[in-house]
């Protein structure tokens, strides 16, 4: 494979990307995630109503020009609560995924770089942790430390650590087998330096994709926990608890449960599509030709 | 066209100039031996080739010398790098990893075969050159940056300043290999190991690359260990050559002697199979026979015969070859064969037994 042939190949590939193959998952994912982010951002400066304002005379109202999504059983504006709830959702997602990445990535890199006799037991330990359901861990945490947004996101984060560790390890193994790592070692580079300078940058795209997918799972987990009462406590608006609220009046106002459900679905779908789209975009097999 | 009478190995007697001393080096994967009892020495300024087919253990030998054997492989024997500054010799095989890491890139360095993958795709080329100098605290950040451009100029990259700012994928294979050489030479090593540095390059670029390697090593008075399966490359670059087969060094000597009158049947097969055959053959026959090849193929590791490893493919093999053949001749000009070809006997009259 000569350099010239390589260059032609590369040109053709870029051309193909420019013309047809639109990365739809990435686009839709960005739009949906953007919707949630905008909602949360706007809620800081403006909501149609005060999300905590209880209007006893206007309970369980249907959609109307003044309350676009209606009001809940306390007469609070649903749209306003949904917007503020987006903040909770994103907050929990960011902290949980951040925590998982911060602990899981170094652990995974160590697993990948350690000699086999040390790495194998670590991998088994990680598998053990991976087998433990995150939701159960969160409920346990809630029972022990008291249910709150903080316990929920820490529990979700810790539950996601082994997922990051595993993906980081597999990426590390791949990078460690490349010749540039061998070359770096032959230049006298120490293992920590190789981890920071060579391994981490080269597995960052893997981690980014995983973060997006884990974010979706964290959003869902937070909603589930709040629905069960182990997460965000009222009156702070959260999508999960709003769903629970709506569930009690399902017979009377079935439309109530649609809104938080829709919001959760949009956020989860958005982050999943974003992850999928990023995976296509950052595929290491194509990275050589693109960047 | 006769064999040279005295091997012109430079500095064979002096030991204060020795740069790399390998003694009884074994490499094994568990109980499976891959490299056996490799012994040789390199003095500063030496240019020595290590040749053999794929799977003969050349690259493993190089990695063992660098202390870079992959997980699961272990080395035995000694590899000394008598550094000028050090109070005592360090044995790469037994020394702690941190000690060996300090030697790598400073005292000994290596150029790899595949230039397309030997550079970090996410780092600017200049940074990668500069870092080798910073690793060993031999230069400050600014100094290293300046010197890295200098080094890129030394390996005759046009616009070294511009190249330094580029990423590996923006360079051609030949350019990348030059960058690799610049990295290997950055700290003026005593030993430069090149593992098939030109195999992946276009033929037109190969010669330039070889010149750069030889010049770079000569400027630093470094010992050059050149691993390849290309005999023509060895003939141009190396003054001494070691032939490896099945993890054993089966013949060694001055390049000219080994190629003109190979004694070991394997070496003879290699030479005949390469372009050098007609040039070196005493009778100069040029009739159009099919290209000579060595019958069979290299067995998988662990499936080499006992005794002489080449026994299963050798036309001269007999009962005597069932035991490991002893070394014949000088340490730096000899062979391990019971039935070596005799250069005084003209070819054609086939072997006796």
Image (cartoon, rainbow, N blue to C red):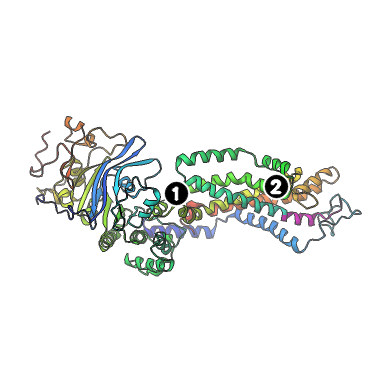
What is the residue that sits farthest to the right in this orientation? A57
**Which residue is painted at 77% across and 52% down in the image?**
A237
Of callouts 2 and 1, the N-terminal one: 2
In the rendered image, the vertical position of residue B8 relative to residue B166, given as above or below: above
* Residue pointed to by mark 1: A176
Q: Position of residue A177 (x, y in %)?
A: 43, 48
**Which residue is painted at 70% across and 60% down in the image?**
A38
- Looking at the image, which is closer to me, B168 or A231? A231
Calculate the distance from the C-alpha at mark 2 to the C-alpha at mark 1: 36 Å
Residue A252 falls left or right of residue A150: right
Give the quadrant of the N terminus of chain A: bottom left
Any part of residue B167 in sight? yes
Q: Position of residue B74 (x, y in %)?
A: 36, 41
* Residue pointed to by mark 2: A152
Residue B203 is tagged as none
What segment carries the magenta color? A74-87
- Looking at the image, which is closer to me, B25 or A57? B25
Q: Position of residue B208 (x, y in %)?
A: 28, 62
What is the residue that sits farthest to the front in this orientation? B87
Q: Choose top left, top right, bottom left or bottom right for residue B197.
A: bottom left
Are callouts 2 and 1 both on one chain?
Answer: yes
What type of secondary structure mainly makes up the magenta span? helix
Residue A3 falls left or right of residue B234: right
Residue A108 falls left or right of residue A181: right
Q: Helix or strand or loop: what does disc 1 sit on? A: helix
Residue A78 magenta-highlighted? yes
Residue B87 magenta-highlighted? no
For the image, the number of numbered tags is: 2
């Amino acid at each position: 494979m000569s350099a010239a042939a390589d260059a032609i190949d590369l040109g053709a590939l870029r051309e193909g990307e420019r013309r047809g193959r639109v990365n739809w998952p990435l686009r839709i994912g960005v739009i949906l995630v953007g919707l949630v982010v905008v909602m949360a951002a706007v809620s800081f400066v403006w909501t149609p109503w005060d999300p905590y304002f209880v209007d006893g005379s206007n309970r369980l109202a249907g959609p109307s020009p003044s309350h676009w999504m209606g009001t809940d059983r306390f007469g609070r504006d649903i749209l306003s609560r949904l917007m503020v709830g987006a903040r909770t959702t994103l907050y929990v997602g960011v902290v949980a995924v951040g925590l998982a990445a911060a602990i899981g990535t170094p652990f995974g890199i160590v697993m990948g770089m350690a000699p086999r006799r040390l790495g194998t037991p670590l991998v088994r330990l990680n598998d053990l942790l991976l087998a433990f359901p995150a939701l159960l861990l969160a409920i346990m945490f809630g029972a022990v430390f008291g249910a709150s947004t903080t316990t929920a996101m820490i529990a979700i984060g810790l539950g996601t650590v082994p997922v990051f560790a595993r993906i980081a390890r597999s990426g590390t193994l791949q990078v460690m087998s490349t010749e540039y790592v061998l070359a770096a070692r032959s230049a006298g580079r120490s293992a920590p330096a190789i981890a920071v300078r060579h391994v981490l940058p080269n597995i960052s795209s893997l981690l980014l994709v995983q973060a997006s997918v884990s974010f979706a799972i964290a959003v869902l987990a937070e909603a589930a926990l709040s629905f069960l009462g182990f997460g965000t406590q009222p009156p702070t608006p959260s999508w999960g608890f709003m769903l629970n609220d709506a569930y009690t009046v399902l017979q009377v106002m079935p439309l109530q449960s649609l809104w938080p459900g829709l919001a959760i679905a949009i956020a989860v779908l958005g982050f999943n599509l974003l992850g999928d789209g990023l995976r296509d975009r950052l595929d290491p097999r194509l990275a050589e030709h693109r960047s | 066209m006769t064999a040279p009478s005295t091997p012109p190995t430079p500095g064979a007697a002096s030991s204060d100039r020795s740069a790399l001393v390998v003694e009884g080096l074994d490499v094994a994967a568990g109980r499976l031996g891959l490299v056996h009892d490799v012994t040789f020495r390199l003095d500063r300024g030496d240019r020595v080739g290590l040749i053999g087919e794929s799977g003969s253990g050349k690259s493993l030998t190089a990695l063992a010398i660098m202390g870079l054997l992959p997980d699961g492989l272990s080395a035995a024997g000694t590899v000394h790098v008598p550094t000028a500054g050090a109070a005592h010799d360090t044995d790469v095989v037994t020394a702690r990893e941190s000690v060996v890491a300090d030697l790598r890139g400073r005292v000994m360095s290596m150029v790899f075969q595949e230039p397309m993958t030997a550079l970090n795709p996410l780092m600017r080329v200049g940074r990668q050159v500069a870092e080798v100098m910073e690793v060993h605290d031999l230069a400050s950040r600014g100094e290293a940056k300046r010197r890295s451009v200098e080094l890129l100029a030394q390996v005759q990259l046009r616009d070294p300043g511009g190249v330094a700012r580029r990423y590996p994928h923006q360079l051609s294979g030949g350019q990348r290999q030059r960058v690799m050489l610049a990295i290997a030479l950055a700290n003026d090593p005593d030993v430069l190991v090149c593992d098939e540095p030109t195999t992946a390059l276009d033929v037109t670029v190969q010669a330039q690359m070889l010149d750069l390697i030889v010049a770079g090593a000569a400027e630093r008075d470094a010992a050059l260990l050149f691993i390849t399966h290309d005999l023509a490359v060895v003939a141009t670059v190396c003054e001494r050559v070691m032939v490896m087969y099945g993890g054993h060094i089966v013949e060694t000597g001055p390049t000219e002697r080994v190629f003109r009158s190979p004694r070991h049947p394997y070496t003879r097969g290699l030479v005949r199979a390469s372009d050098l055959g007609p040039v070196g053959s005493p009778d100069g026959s040029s009739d159009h026979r099919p290209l000579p090849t060595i019958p069979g193929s290299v067995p998988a590791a662990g499936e080499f015969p006992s005794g002489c490893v080449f026994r299963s493919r050798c036309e001269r093999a007999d009962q005597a070859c069932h035991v490991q053949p002893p070394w014949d001749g000088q340490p730096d000009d000899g062979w391990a064969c019971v039935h070596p070809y005799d250069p005084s006997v003209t070819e054609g009259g086939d072997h006796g037994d």
